[in-house]
Amino acid sequence: MTSTRNILVVAHALRADTVAAARRVTAALVAAGARAVFSADDRAQLGDAIEDFDNTGTLGIDVPVDEIELAIVLGGDGTILRAAELVRGGTAPVLGINMGHVGFLAEIERDELDEAVHRAILGDYRVEERLALAVRVQDSDDSLIYETWALNEATVEKASRERMLEVVLEVDGRPLSSFGCDGMVVSTPTGSTAYNFSAGGPVIWPTVEAMAVVPLSAHALFAKPLVVGPEATIAIEVLERTNGTGILWCDGRRSHDLPPGARVMVRRSPEPVRLARLHPAAFTDRLVRKFRLPVEGWRGPISAEPETWAMHEPTETETDPATRPGAGA
């Protein structure tokens, strides 16, 4: 490992405000003695905004991924997902600065940019590990034909708008149901506020280790969203009687065609995704802020924390059936 501090800067370089922010971040990193690292694509797109800085590097060319200390991301959720892909295989956490709209994965908003970079340089953040998915695809002969991962979700979708996808769903090696549908979503808690949410799946708190399985427009009596344990293995088979093909999408970024008979297996990845957090904000507050949920009428928190609540032991009178309300006549 080199003694140089390598910090990856990932930017949505098609917006002028984000390009300007990338230059500010680069200037702050270089002034602090750190090396600002960019992917080859970002370096080409940022162009003049960063070319006059000396202490910079290019990911995968002169700076390997396992030497990245932190990734600072300027953009929305799509840019953060791209950053998670860039640092996959290393241990660098991702610090998201929202330059988009909702930016649910982002830690902070654009008006906190300078403070965030300052704290990142000081190493003043905590790392939160998020469950990721390992995804494998087999053909009808059970040969492995594709392998990838996902932070938000893996979706099996129909490839043709006019045709339905026929699938059978399996959980932990046992068949659960088969039906026609537009597709299936397997989501992590992190992705539960993304495609899973739009498809009618449950919002899962990040502290809950679980996966959600949500059918899309299923023609079936039993096709409700499911929540399974973190060690479960989900399999979705594209039945050979399907008239057409399917397609696998992971985080909306990586795809693979699914011929009839294909089997998509999803389980927990042994490699989590690491997010850098500057503030210990409650997930409830994040939901309220990002979705602009109405909370008028809330009376405020209780005076005592739940762990200090005294357990009420029922009295003999309360346990006697004859003395309960409604007993007697």
Image: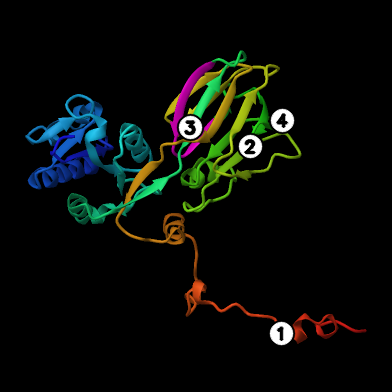
Residue assigned mark 2: 215
Query: Amino acid under label 2?
Result: Pro
Query: Amino acid under label 1?
Result: Thr
Residue 95: horizontal and vertical position, in percent?
29, 47
Q: Where does the magenta region start and end?
A: 144-155
Q: How is the image coloured?
A: rainbow
Q: Nearer the viewer, residue 47 or 215?
A: 215
Residue 32 inside the magenta-drawn segment: no
Residue assigned mark 1: 315
Residue assigned mark 4: 179
Other-residue count near label 1 (Cα within 10 Å), few / some / many at <14 / 14–19 / ≥20: few
Asked if labels 2 and 4 touch by Cβ distance under 8 angstroms, the answer is yes
The image quadrant where one finds the C terminus is bottom right
Residue 152 inside the magenta-drawn segment: yes
Q: CA distance from mark 2 to mark 1?
A: 49 Å
Disc 2 versus disc 1: nearer the observer: 1
Q: Quadrant of residue 149?
A: top left
Q: Earlier in the sequence, mark 1 or mark 4?
A: 4
At mark 1, the secondary structure is loop
Residue drawn at 16 percent across, 41 percent down: 5
Disc 3 versus disc 1: nearer the observer: 1
Residue 192: horizontal and vertical position, in percent?
51, 46
Q: Earlier in the sequence, mark 4 or mark 3?
A: 3
Q: Is residue 321 left or right of residue 275?
A: right
Q: Nearer the viewer, residue 269 or 166?
A: 269
Q: Quadrant of residue 196?
A: top right
Residue assigned mark 3: 134
Query: Amino acid under label 3?
Result: Ala
